[in-house]
Every structure is written in structure tokens, then in C-alpha cells.
Image: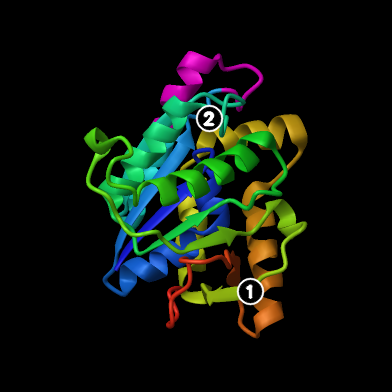
């Protein structure tokens, strides 16, 4: 099976679904990870041009640790826009390249506009990717793909329909997040946030809900053409 995770900023994948992706990888599936935004606004002191390069390198280090193929769609922070045709074409190209059997992405009601707009872009692009005459130069058409939405920030407004036991993957999930040094340092110094600790606490909460030590939670998109008669998550 081919698994495509399209998250927004370079550390969002580690925060929301990296344990599940690691589990997919262990089971022999192909994992393609895409961060749609370059994360260039995620700091007070480091300027955007420099920060974008730093965060791309950090994302690559995390993906290499896990053995994931990584794609950077390189859209600037705060410019994610579901009405932007060029951004849509970027994601269309990613989806047709990946040929996914399942897509993981953000819910439309998440905490910031970039996440919300990306959710809409993925929904649009993943349907449009099936239409042969829609930008055929961006790749061959693929099937309309099932979508699972990752946890919203802090689990707010998320009512999970699926859980994945990531107890065995939790330590590696944490090591992946630690590769995002610029974000960890900034969040600690400027906001007093230990995002590594918060990630573990949240995974423990989701684990308590489903009877394991650590888990990640998802909400399945239930619409015509997106369902399958078998479980897709590991």
C-alpha cells in the first residue's frame, strides 16, 4: 500500500501522525511525507529566508530517521489559500506522483488558517487528481483516495473515529520531533512550551481512550467514493 501524509508545517507530521507512519513503514508499506508549507514564519528572530532553509533541513533529518520519502511543497507560512490555483497544482502533482491508497491530512476545523486552507486544498486536489483532462501535464490520473484527518491541535474539536496503537513507535516519534531544533528552542524560549512533553502527554491521553499506552487518533472522511470495505490504518 502507498501512504501519503500531507501536513502543513515541517513539524506537524511529527506531532500528529508520525507514529502511525512509522507503523505503516514497519509493515512494509511505502510512506511519502509532504509538508506543504516551508515554515518560514515560525520564529521571532530568524528571518524567513534563512528559517525556511533551516526547517527544510530539519524535516529532511526527521524523515531520514524514519526512512520516509519527503516532499516539500514550499508554500510560505500564512499564504496557504484553497482558492490559489498554483497551490492546488502543487498538491495535485504530489498526489498524482504518490498514487496513494490513503491520505492523512489536517481537519478543516483546525486551529490556524494554514491548516484549514490546506485541508480544503487536499480535498479538492485529491478528487481532481482522478480527472484525466484536469492538468494532464501534472501526471496520470489516480483513484479518488480515502482521507483520514489527523488530530486537531490539543485534540480540540476532534472526535476520533479511529485509533492507532503507537506504543512501540512512541520513542522514535519523539526522536523525529527532536530533529526540529529551531522550533523546539523557539517554543521553549518564547512561549515556555515543551512541545516534546506535550506530544507524549497527548499520545498518552489518546492511548487511555482506546486501552493502550500511547495512540494517535484520526477522523475518517465519510463521503461518496472515499470509503473502503476494509481497514486502511495499521
Quickly name the residue at label 1. 161
Q: Is residue 136 above or below residue 140?
A: above
95 or 234: nearer the eye?
A: 95
Q: Is 40 or 91 nearer to us in this picture?
A: 91
Residue at (47, 54) in percent of width and height: 175
Give the camera-side residue of 226 and 2.
Answer: 226
- Considering depth in this image, is 201 or 3 the residue closer to the camera? 3
Is residue 30 shown left or right of residue 226?
left
- Dividing the picture into quarters, in which one does residue 190 lie? top right
Badge number at residue 99 = none
Q: Position of residue 225 (x, y in %)?
A: 46, 66
Label 2 crowd bin: few (<14), some (14–19), many (20+), radius 10 Å? many
Residue 172 visible to the viewer: yes
Q: Secondary structure at mark 2?
A: loop
- In terms of secondary structure, where does tag 1 sit? loop
| Left or right of 155 in this view: 79 | left
| Residue 124 shown in magenta | no
Which stretch appears magenta?
A: 41-57
Colour scheme of the rendered structure: rainbow
Mark 1 and mark 2: Cα distance apart in space: 29 Å
Position of residue 218 relative to residue 31, above or below, is: below
- The quarter of the picture where residue 144 lies is bottom left
Question: Whole-percent x and y of residue 162?
Answer: 59, 75
Per the image, the residue denoted by label 2 is 39
Amino acid at each position: 500500500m502507498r501512504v501519503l501524509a500531507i501536513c502543513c508545517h515541517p513539524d506537524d507530521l511529527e506531532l500528529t501522525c508520525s507514529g502511525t507512519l512509522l507503523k505503516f513503514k514497519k509493515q512494509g508499506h511505502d510512506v511519502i511525507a509532504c509538508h506543504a508549507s516551508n515554515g518560514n514564519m515560525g520564529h521571532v528572530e530568524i528571518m524567513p529566508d534563512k528559517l525556511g532553509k533551516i526547517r527544510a533541513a530539519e524535516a529532511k533529518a526527521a524523515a531520514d530517521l524514519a526512512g520516509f520519502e519527503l516532499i516539500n511543497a514550499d508554500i510560505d507560512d500564512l499564504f496557504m489559500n484553497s482558492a490559489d490555483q498554483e497551490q492546488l497544482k502543487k498538491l495535485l502533482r504530489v498526489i498524482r506522483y504518490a498514487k496513494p491508497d490513503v491520505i492523512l491530512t489536517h481537519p478543516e476545523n483546525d486551529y490556524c488558517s494554514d491548516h484549514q486552507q490546506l485541508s480544503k486544498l487536499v480535498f479538492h486536489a485529491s478528487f481532481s487528481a482522478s480527472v484525466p483532462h484536469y492538468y494532464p501535464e501534472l501526471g496520470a490520473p489516480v483513484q479518488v483516495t480515502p482521507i483520514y484527518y489527523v488530530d486537531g491541535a490539543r485534540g480540540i474539536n476532534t472526535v476520533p473515529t479511529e485509533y492507532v496503537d503507537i506504543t512501540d513507535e512512541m520513542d522514535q516519534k519523539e526522536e523525529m520531533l527532536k530533529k526540529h531544533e529551531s522550533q523546539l528552542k523557539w517554543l521553549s524560549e518564547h512561549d515556555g512550551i515543551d512541545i516534546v512533553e506535550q506530544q507524549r502527554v497527548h499520545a498518552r491521553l489518546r492511548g487511555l481512550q482506546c486501552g493502550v499506552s500511547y495512540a494517535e487518533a484520526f477522523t475518517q472522511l465519510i463521503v461518496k467514493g472515499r470509503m473502503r470495505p476494509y481497514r486502511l490504518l495499521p
